[in-house]
Amino acid sequence: MDKKIIINGRDLGLREVIQVAREGYEIELSQDAIRNIEFSRGIVKKIIEEEHTVYGINTGFGKFSDVKISQEDCNTLQRNLIISHACGCGPILQRDETRAVMLLRINALSKGYSGISLNTLNVLIDMLNRGVHPSIPEKGSLGASGDLAPLSHMVLPMIGEGEAEYKGRIMSGEEAMIEAGIETITLSYKEGLALINGTQVMTAIGALVVYDAIKLTKISDLSAALTVEALRGITDAFDLRVHSIRNHKGQIKTAENLLALLKGSEFTTKQGELRVQDAYTLRCIPQIHGASKDAIEYAKEKIEIEINSVTDNPIVTLEGDVISGGNFHGQPIALAMDFLGIAVAEMANVSERRLERLVNYQLNDLPPFLTREGGLNSGFMITQYAAASLVSENKILAHPASVDSIPSSANQEDHVSMGTIAAVKSRKILDNAFRVIATEIFAACQAIDFRKEERLGEGTCIAYNKIRENVKFIDKDVIMYKEIDKCFEIIKQDSFIDFM
C-alpha cells in the first residue's frame, strides 16, 4: 500500500490527518500547490524590491505594525519573530498531535496565500516525513493571532534552535536536523510570520479529539447496551417509532445501534414484564447519547473546514493583492471545542450514573457491589468512586474557555479566542471519559455473569467475549486498577468496535 498523501490545501480529511499523525504516512505537494506557492512568493519578492510598506513583510508585528523595517534587516526580523515568540510552557504535545500540527500548517501554506518560499516549506515537509518532531509545549497560545507561541516552537528546529524528538530521543533541534540529514535554513521576508500565524495547534488537537470522540460514541452505545442487559432493561423505549417523531439524527442513530446490539438478547425485557419504566439513564440513552453525537458532528464539520482554510495574516491573494485581515482568529474552533468538551463530558456523566445502578443493590436485584461475599470483599464499590471523581473533574474542565478574553499587544489584539485551551481541555475530558466508560463495561460484564443461562444480544455478545478474553470474573477482591486498565486498553483498540 502506498503510504503517501498528496497535499493541495483543498481536500485533506480527518482520516488523512490520522494516517499522517498516527500511522506514519508521508506527504508530497501537488503540482498545483507548488505553482501557487511560487506565485505568491513572487508577489512578496516584488513588494520587497519595490519597497512598498506591507504589514508582516517589512514592518514590525502586533503593536509594532507601524515600524518600517529596512530590506537588509528583513531576515533578522523573521528570526527575531520566532525566537521571541517561543514562550510556550507546560507538557510537550504528544507525537501524534505534533505531527498533526506540522501537517495542517503545511496544508494551509500549500494553498499559496502565504508568501512562503518553496524551499522553506520543503524543510518542514522533510521534517514530517523523516520523523523530526519539534518539542511544542501545549500552553502559551491565546488562539487569536494564530497559535503564535506553540507554532514558534515548531519552527525553532528549522533554524537550528529549540528541541525535537527524533527516533525516540529528545535532543537539540540542530542535532535532530543533522541526524535526519535535513539542512537548517535562514528565514527570509514574511516566512517566519507565515509559519506561525495560524490556528493549526488548536485545529490539530481538535481533529484528533473529534476522531476519537466519534469512536467513543460507538463504545458508549455498546457500554450502555451491556448495562441494559445486566439490569434487565426495557427495550420498548428504543422503538424507532418513538425517535422518528422527534427526528434528531443522533437520537435515531443511537436507538438503531441499541436495537442492533441487543438483537436476540434474552436478558432484556418488555414494558410491564418486570417494571413499567426504566430510570432515565437507561430509558433516555438515545436522547442523551444522540445529543452528544450531534454536537460532535458539529465540531467535526468545523474542524474539517479549518483543516483546509487559510489562517494567515496578511493574505497574498492569487490576484496579486496583499490584504491584512483576521483569519488567524480561532473563534470558530474555540466554540466548537468547548461544545465538544461538554458533549463528551455528558457521555461520561451518564455512564457513571449507569455504573451506580450496576453496583448499588438498592437499585437492582444483583449482589451489593457485584461481589458474592460482601463485607469481606468490597467488590466494585470503589470503581464508582473513581469514576465519579473523573466525572467531577470533567465538569470543571467543561467550563468554556471561549467566554474568556484577555487583550494583548498593547490592546491592539483586544479580543482573543482561547481556542487552544479549549482544544486541550477537550482532550483531557475525552481521556477521562474513556476511563469511565471502560469502568462501566467492566462492571456490566461482572453483573451479566451473575445471570446464568441467558443469551446476550448479537452485538453485546461480541464485545463481552472480547473483554472476557483478558478480564475475568472477579470472584474475590483483586487490585482493581489493573483490571480497569485492561478494559481501557481493550476499548481503545479500533478492533473492539470493528463489527459496529
Image (tube, grey):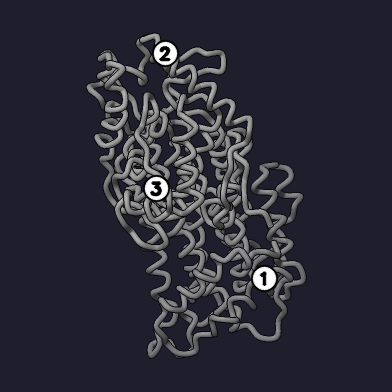
Disc 2 or 3, which lies upstream in sequence?
A: 2
Q: Front-most of 484 and 149? A: 149
**Callout 2: few (<14), some (14-19), or many (20+) C-alpha neighbours within 10 Å?**
some
467 lies left or right of 82: right
Question: Would residue 271 be visible to someone looking at this image?
Answer: no
Q: Is residue 209 above or below residue 437?
A: above
288 lies left or right of 415: right
Q: Front-most of 448 and 462? A: 462
Return the x and y of residue 498 as percentages of the image width and height. Answer: 67, 64
The kind of residue on which mark 2 rests is Ile
Q: Front-most of 255 and 435? A: 435
257 lies left or right of 440: right
Separation of marks 2 and 3 at Cα, in angstroms: 39 Å
Residue holding disc 3 = 424
Label 3 element class:
helix
Disc 3 or 1, which lies upstream in sequence?
A: 3
Q: Which mark is residue 460?
A: 1
Which of the image's four quarters has the N terminus?
bottom right
Which quadrant of the structure image shows residue 389? bottom left
Residue holding disc 2 = 47
The kind of residue on which mark 1 rests is Thr
Query: What residue appears at the point 38 percent right and 90 percent down from the top-left corner?
Result: 376
Label 1 element class:
helix
Query: What residue appears at the point 56 percent right and 73 percent down from the top-left corner?
Result: 444
Which quadrant of the structure image shows residue 326? top left
The kind of residue on which mark 3 rests is Val
Q: Are marks 2 and 1 in contact (CB under 8 Å)?
A: no
